[in-house]
Amino acid sequence: MFERKGEITYPASAGDADTVMMAAIEAGAEDVDSSEDGHVIWCGDTDLNEVATALEAALGESESTKLVWKPVTTTELDLEGMQKLMKLIDALEDDDDVQRVTANFEAPDSVMDQL
């Protein structure tokens, strides 16, 4: 359901999608997700330090560099399922012992509008 990956994030001001993609490829990254909010660069968990160092030389300091659990498969939820899931996630996030919550759901825009 999840795989361990390195995640490096940059603001949109770091460069356009092509510039960031080329820098990521040269640094040894596996994938790049670019949007108007910024860039998320994915790499193998054991390659995180090397990729982050190479990207810092090319793009400057990143917003964050961390190991994460990335979903491999996702599950689409209806309104009732989303309500239950949001209640569970809120309860987990309120627990002082929980550092981070990772989920693998997708919700259609119509369901998100109803929430």
Image: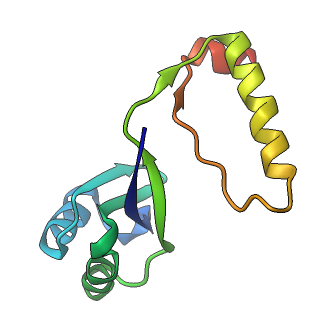
Left of 54 or right of it: where is 105? right
Residue at 21 percent of width and 61 percent of height: 21
Quadrant of the snapshot with the N terminus = top left
Q: Nearer the viewer, residue 53 or 46?
A: 46
Q: Quadrant of residue 107?
A: top right
Side of 83 relative to 100 (left or right) = right
From the top left corner, tell me how far across and down residue 48 is, in percent: 33, 75
Q: Quarter of the image holding residue 40?
A: bottom left
Q: Quadrant of residue 59?
A: bottom left
- Is 54 placed above or below 1 here? below
Which residue is drawn at the image coordinates 79% and 46% (left, top)? 92
> Is 70 in front, or is 39?
70
Image vertical order of residue 80 relative to residue 112, above or below: above
Q: Position of residue 65 (x, y in %)?
A: 46, 74
Q: Residue at position x 24%, y 83% from top?
A: 54
Across and down, in percent, residue 31 comes to: 25, 54
Residue 77, position in %: x, y? 58, 16
| Residue nearer the viewer, 10 or 4 | 4
